[in-house]
Each structure stands twice: as C-alpha cells, then as structure tokens.
Image (tube, rainbow, N blue to C red):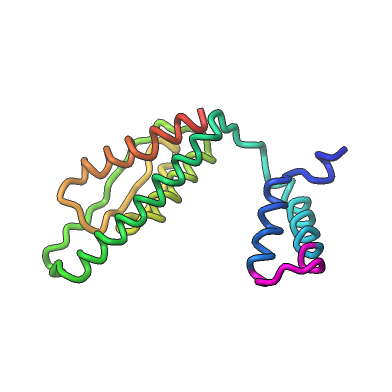
Amino acid sequence: MLRKLVPHPLLAVTLACVWLALVNKITLGNIILGGFLGLVIALMTAPYWPGKPRVRHPFRVVGFVFLVLWDIVVANVQIALIILFKPTDKLKSAWITVPLELTSPEAITVLAGTITMTPGTVSATLSSCGGAILVHALHTDDPIAVRDDIKSRYEKRLLEIFS
C-alpha cells in the first residue's frame, strides 16, 4: 500500500529538498509544497522506472563521490593551467574508446556522467551493444593511460557498487 503511494521515496525526498533549496526559505508552506511536488512527480514518473537499481555496497558510494569530487578539483586546476599556459597548437586532444565491463544501465550512466563532470573529458557516445564508451579528452599525451585511468578509478569502483 505504502509502496504504491510513494513508489520512489528517495526521489520524493530529494525533490522536496531541491524545492526548498530553490525557494531559499524554509517555511511550513514551502515544506508542504515541496513534499507535495516530490510525491506527485514520483508518482507521475513511476511507470518510466523499469526497475530499482541494485546497489550491493551502498557505503562505497560515499567513497566514490569523494573520489569524483577530488578528481573534479584536480582536473579544474589542470585545465586552468592548460588554458592559461599551453599554446593551442600544442594541445593533443584525443578520442578514446573505453571498453566496458559494466552491464547495468544505471552504472554505465553514472560512469558517463562522471567522465563528463570531470573537466577535460566528455563521454560522447555509447556503442550500440553497450560494450564501449567513446570519450574525448581535451589534452593527453597518452590516450591509453587515460583509458586505463577511467577503468581503474571509476569503472572498477562502479563494478563493486553495482555488481
């Protein structure tokens, strides 16, 4: 009964919190409206959620988030240095194919988002069979090292989280 009323409780709570952050004022009316919006949106989108992703090690998610945040900070500094001091003709951009061991659509989506959030790289497309992702790197001397870094830092951890 409760599952039918609130099919995705985490989504509903997240949407309510986002609403409160957007209005930037915590009042009883905003809490009620945020809760209402969270419930309604969760109910309206429930048919489009084919299944619940299985997270085997939820506490490893915290470590993964901190790793990604750290990588974003480091990459921002590296990109700033490239933009400020590297002549355009010295840039070595590359397209890199990263073969995937991930099979879960949710895990592949998290990997693609992580790659894109890290400055200097962007995930461009997923192969039709889902076995590889195409990544563009703004500057790299060694595309194979970038591929191996993505696999060891992100994919390996996502395999532990989602498998």
Q: Position of residue 52 (x, y in %)?
A: 65, 37
Q: Closer to the camera, 157 or 103?
A: 157
The residues colored magenta run 22-31
Q: Who's the residue at 68% across and 57% down the image? A: 15
Q: Tell me the quadrant of the picture where the N terminus can be found.
A: top right
Query: How many badges with numbers are in the image?
Result: 0
Magenta-drawn stretch, dominant element (helix, strand or loop): helix
Q: Who's the residue at 39% across and 45% down the image? A: 67
Q: Is residue 52 left or right of residue 68?
A: right
Q: Position of residue 104 (x, y in %)?
A: 52, 34
Q: Who's the residue at 79% across and 56% down the image? A: 40
Q: Is residue 151 left or right of residue 161?
A: left
- State whether residue 126 is above or below residue 157: below
Q: Who's the residue at 81% across and 66% down the image? A: 28
Q: Position of residue 64 (x, y in %)?
A: 44, 41
Q: Closer to the camera, 144 or 68?
A: 68
Q: Which of the 4 quarters of the picture holds residue 129?
A: top left
Is 55 within the magenta?
Answer: no
Q: Is residue 15 left or right of residue 86?
A: right
Q: Position of residue 88 (x, y in %)?
A: 16, 69
